[in-house]
Image (cartoon, rainbow, N blue to C red):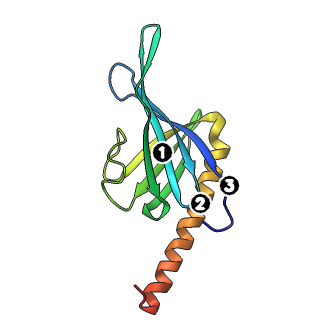
């Protein structure tokens, strides 16, 4: 990822997995070559909160097909579309290589920066691929 080497971290959640109010909480960590997803299931039971063990998922940036951020009044929704249908299969509520993550109000600016950086990377990657195709490189 040219011109960007620092690590960027974005908190997210995937809400309402079941009627018990369970949700996924996690972090997206953007590095120079991959998107690291760290998450756990959180279930509230009366006065206690139960959390599962941490799960990890590493996605190469080249596997990301599209990223989109939609702003809402109290939150934002970050949608990732992967190039392969099974890339996100371990994440609850993912379907056809796509996942929508809820971003808290206080993390909107980080989310915008996150999307801007990833969108630039994807555009540059697609341009490089097009140039290789035109040259006939493998």
Contact (Cβ within 8 Å) of mark 1 with mark 3: no
The quarter of the image holding the C terminus is bottom left
The residue to which callout 2 is attached is 32
- Helix or strand or loop: what does disc 2 sit on? loop
- Helix or strand or loop: what does disc 1 sit on? strand
Residue 120's place in the image compared with 10, above or below, is below
- Residue 69: x and y in percent read 54, 49
The residue to which callout 3 is attached is 6
The residue to which callout 1 is attached is 37
Contact (Cβ within 8 Å) of mark 2 with mark 1: no
Q: Is residue 100 left or right of residue 123?
A: left
Cα gap from disc 1 to disc 3, whole angstroms: 17 Å
Cα gap from disc 3 to disc 2, whole angstroms: 8 Å
**Label 3 CA crowd tier, 10 Å (few <14, some 14–19, many 20+):** few
Q: Residue at x 41, y 55 (%)?
A: 81
**What is the number of the mark on residue 59?**
none
Q: Residue at x 54, y 61 (%)?
A: 33
Residue 135's place in the image compared with 90, above or below, is below
């Amino acid at each position: 990822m040219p011109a960007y080497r620092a690590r960027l971290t974005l908190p997210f959640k995937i809400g309402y997995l079941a009627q018990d109010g369970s949700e996924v909480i996690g972090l997206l960590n953007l590095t120079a070559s991959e998107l690291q997803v760290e998450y756990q299931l959180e279930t509230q039971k009366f006065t206690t909160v139960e959390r599962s063990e941490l799960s990890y998922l590493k996605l190469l940036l080249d596997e990301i097909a599209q990223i989109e951020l939609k702003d809402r009044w109290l939150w934002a929704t970050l949608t990732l579309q992967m190039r392969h249908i099974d890339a996100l299969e371990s994440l609850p509520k993912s379907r056809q290589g796509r996942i929508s993550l809820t971003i808290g109000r206080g993390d909107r600016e980080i989310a915008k920066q996150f999307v801007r950086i990833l969108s630039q990377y994807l555009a540059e990657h697609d341009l490089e691929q097009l140039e290789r195709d035109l040259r006939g490189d493998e």
